[in-house]
Amino acid sequence: MLTRSPVRAGFGLFIFLLWASVSCRVRERWQSFTLFSFDTLCEVQIFCSAGQVGAIQEEIRNVFASVEQHFSPGRQDLASPLVIELFQQSRRVFLETGGLFDISVGPLVDLWGFSSKEYRVPRPEEIEAALSLVGMDKIRLEANRLVLQPGMKLDWGGIAKGWAVDMAARSLRNAGITRGFINAGGDLYCWGSNPEGKEWRIGVKHPRQRGYIRVLSVKDTGVATSGDYQRYFEKDGVRYCHILNPTTGYPAHERTSVTVFGPEATLCDALSTALFVSPDPAAILKKYPDYGAIIADVHGEVALMGKTPSLVSF
Amino acid sequence: MDRRRFIKTVLSTSLLTPLLARARFVEPDLTLYLISDHPEDYLPEIMVELGAMSSFSSGRFSFLTPHPSENQIKTALTGCGWAYSASPSSTGLNLSFAALHQSARPSFTLVRGRNIMDVRSRRLSRLWKQMDNSGLVSASVTVASFNGPKQPSAQGRTAAISTDGKKRAMLALAKDQTKRFDTPGGEVVVGIEGGRAIVLASTCRHKICQSAPAVSLAGERIICAPNRFLLEIEGHRFVDTVTG
């Protein structure tokens, strides 16, 4: 009769546990993939097992598709709980920024041709007329439905992508993914540590040249950038960018790039738009003590405002 | 323009050769050698054209050495969007002056990296001919060094091509080549030239990918969203991801 001594049995158990431990660790590794959504490239890097990747891709696709479906121009269900929720968030930023972030800029965006990509410089009276249709304070919320005045049009481009990134990141963290980032065309959220076990290094693209103006070192942080180089047209030597000041009706022209970092990508997205057009971005950031900004102006000067960032020198 | 005469003009003066050698040592991103006693007459046009054909754009400029035309150059450059700074350490364009040992026809030469740029096929060619045919001789050279932002990433060796999230090809940057790729939205043509990758043609509507500057550093990308096309330079990246 074969019998095993307790020592041999213990050794066998140890080997089994070691193998199980090692195999579990081997199965979790850094996974990277890209997908196209919001008319841009979305980049994802997460620490998980190979078997989880398919479900995670599907989850991110679903979140992004849902946001696109609800917030794309002309496809808005003004009674949808998602729309109401993002409207409430947008309204808070509208009030805090003195109307410099405004999702009702749709008529101005159309007027300048940024929606049709048939760009033109409107006449002052046309801008005046479009401005009469702009202003979140003109939108009412009645019986869980947004009520717009005739001619008003919502443009969620300054907040929806950041919101989608936050939702997708939250979903992945709830599913047990402890480290990673989701970057939807520059609106991103990163959590945990990077593959080197350090904070994530986020390059802030130079608005005019190759390379970066700064490199952020962050974790559990959202980041978003508004730049005059992403969508613009030039006429008679003047650059007209797609970021419109909702109070004047004209494109902002003092800055080339505004990057905001802070706890939520949603707010980073909205604030980067507001700070881009604001004559006094520091005053706005005082209301958001957890947020900071890297602001590049047309003279090539770069200013840091709000919460002090952790920067990587290079 | 005759290429041999062009190169001969560049190298004919006893002063320019050591300047070129120094450029190799310092290695700014781009250096302009402008032979003219009146550089302010030509700098604005050259600057505008450089802005159009490369990633250099207006910023701040400074003087590394005293220049006899300093005031005129300041006026000319501020007129085309550049701002003067007394401190050369933080400027994107630094100018210096040198006297030629022998007079030469007015002309200019652009040196990128270690190569003389051939401007014959560019709009600058017209200006070069105009200067060459002016019948003047000049005894001074203005050296303008353009410094781009610091590049923490290394030069890449391959360009990875993906369509719809799936890797399709790896193109060596060391070999000049042109490749066509079928995409979910049509077709994208990629060119590798002089160690850089660029989109030469695309079936997309707005051609944003075609107007993107050439890429060569690890992590740099050209994206064509309508075609679900991604070109990315592979190699060690200094950053984990990029915003902007």
Image (spheres, coloured by chain):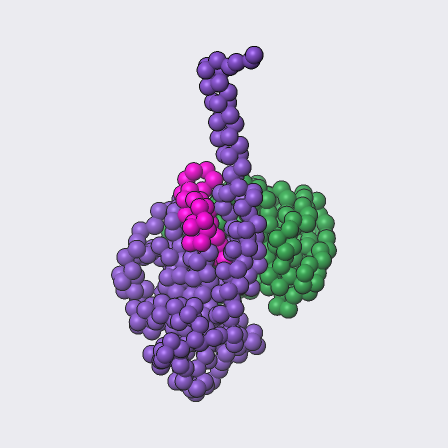
Chain colours: A purple, B green
Pick the residue in front: B120 or A152. A152
| Quarter residue B127 falls in | bottom right
Residue at (44, 46) in percent of width and height: A176
Pick the residue in front: A45 or B199. A45
Residue A249 image point, x, y percent? 41, 78
Residue A105 image point, x, y percent? 43, 76
Where, quadrant-wise, is the N terminus of chain A in this rendering? Answer: top right
Whether residue A292 sits left or right of residue A211 in the image: it is left
Where, quadrant-wise, is the C terminus of chain A in this rendering? Answer: top left
Q: Is residue B68 magenta?
A: no
Q: Which residue, as the protein is rendered here, is positioned at the far front?
A: A1
Q: Is residue A194 magenta?
A: yes
Q: Which residues are magenta?
A: A170-199
Q: Is residue B21 above or below residue B227?
A: above
Residue at (49, 54) in percent of width and height: A183
Residue A178 image point, x, y percent? 43, 44
Whether residue A24 sits left or right of residue A247 in the image: it is right
Whether residue A43 sits left or right of residue A93 in the image: it is right
Residue at (53, 60) in percent of width and height: A62
| Quarter residue B205 falls in | bottom right
Q: Is residue A203 visible?
A: no
Residue B231 image point, x, y percent? 62, 52
Q: How many marks?
A: 0
| Quarter residue B210 falls in | bottom right
Pick the residue in front: B92 or B239. B239
Residue at (70, 44) in percent of width and height: B175
